Image: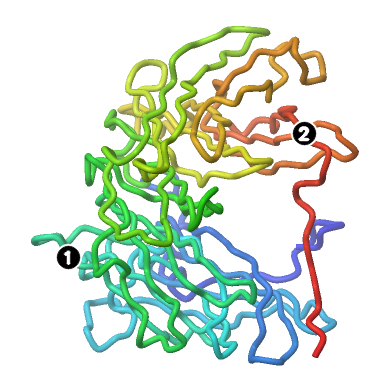
Amino acid sequence: MDAGTGARKYAYMPSTSLTSLATISATSYGSGAHKFTVDGQISVFDTQSAAGSAWRTVAYSGLGAGGKALFAIRLFEGTADNVGALWEVKAPDASDTTNAFNNLGYTYSKPDVARMADGTGIVVVGNGYGSFTGRASLFVLNANTGKLIAEIPTPVSGSETDNGLSSVKLRVDSQNIVQAAYAGDLKGRLWKFDMSGAAASSWKVAFGGVPLFTTPRGANQSITVQPLLLDHPLNGKLVYFGTGKFSETADKQTSALQDFYAIWDADSASGNIVEANLQAQAVNGTVVGNGNTYFTTTTNDVDWGTKKGWYMPLSTAAPYVGERIIYPAQTSRGRIIFTTAAVNSTDPCESTGTGRLFELNAATGSMLNYQVLDTNNDGDINSSDLIVGGLGIGTGIPVVASIVAGTNGANDNKYVIDSSGGTPTKLLEKGGSANVFQRIMWRQIQ
């Protein structure tokens, strides 16, 4: 669409959606179940068609509940906004082991993009849910052609046939060359894939085929969000994610305990981390002020000599029965920010729900030792505000749409939207003296 006028400039319909046109255009449509078509998460990246060639801006997406396909659309290349479809790949209509995409399921995974050592652009996704094999696999495609470069399946546990890999986060070096990939599955396992070798044939599941981390309640703690990676204070990476899913009708009535996790992938890590290896944090209090409900959390430190990360359990009691995490975490100024979703209803049409927003110390998961939210609503954040770790959002399931950094020491703004469809909420939060979102760029001189 034209950003200035809203006029449509290009429309694309994947081939898998064509068979649904008669259904969704029928006069009786609306009296039955909704027919999903294009419902995936979109990622936009700058890539090159080949090493040394001109840059292009490309949108990559799957279909979510709409089907088992992936596609790429060129948005801009060279000096023109020459929009057009680049490629589309899909699973076969019936299981066919000779088809490279036979293990592609419903493509809920958010794509991530990087480069191979030879400069080839790659797009990496989890295989999604409901594939013919029911296995969890990592798919690596050529970013410009859609050709399959590698599929890396995770080991099967027993007779498991109902698994799938969720959204992927890539770990890259300073030249954006892929080193590793992280993703969770429906069985509560967090996997790391070793992609440090120059050749795709050397890529494999890290740690000899065992997960980096496994949740204590397995399939009742599905990992469906894209992980967030931050540098650990000592070495390696901290991998942040929450558990829970919201993709099936039965998910509306679940009350299983879910958690938010930060897992340390140390340089010397060997995988198989479990919850007993983590420092526990918890919500330990409620404060009401100015019509809002705020939450305090524990301030436990993490002994990195004995612990491999931290975690915080969510709620199983009203008003947050069925609380889970369905959106990826974000970070700002050394803080970890995430939202929760609580839906517990027998009504198949109910999707509004409620949730909370938490903002904690990213390294330890503890409540911050300073004021971070404008709890007294006076337009500033100072000693008159409460020190809290979270805020209740009662209008719907919240997600942080954007964080806009303040300038010259001014406070930042978080813009939160929710499932009610109402006006976005602007939350003032503690800023800093520097622009935390500045981009560092350089040019190599040969």
Q: Mark 1 points at which residue?
A: 156
Q: Mark 2 points at which residue?
A: 431
Label whose residue precedes the other's in the sequence (1 or 2)? 1
What is the quadrant of residue 332 in the picture? top right
Residue 14 lies left or right of residue 319; in this view the side is right
Q: Considering depth in this image, is 199 or 309 the residue closer to the camera?
A: 309
Q: Is residue 93 above or below residue 154?
A: below
* Disc 1 from disc 2: Cα separation: 46 Å
Q: Considering depth in this image, is 344 or 299 the residue closer to the camera?
A: 299
Residue 23 shows in this picture: no
Q: What residue type is labelled 1?
A: Val
Identify the secondary structure beneath mark 1. loop
Q: Is residue 189 above or below residue 330?
A: below
Residue at (71% x, 41% y) in the render: 403
Residue 402 lies left or right of residue 255; in this view the side is right
Q: Indicate the position of residue 320 as horizontal and vertical percent values.
A: 40, 22
Alpha-carbon neighbours of circle 2 within 10 Å: few (<14), some, or many (≥20)? many
Residue 117 lies left or right of residue 188; in this view the side is right
Q: Which amino acid does label 2 sit on?
A: Gly
Q: Indicate the position of residue 345 as horizontal and vertical percent values.
A: 34, 26
What quarter of the picture does the N terminus occupy?
A: bottom right
Residue at (20% x, 70% y) in the render: 133
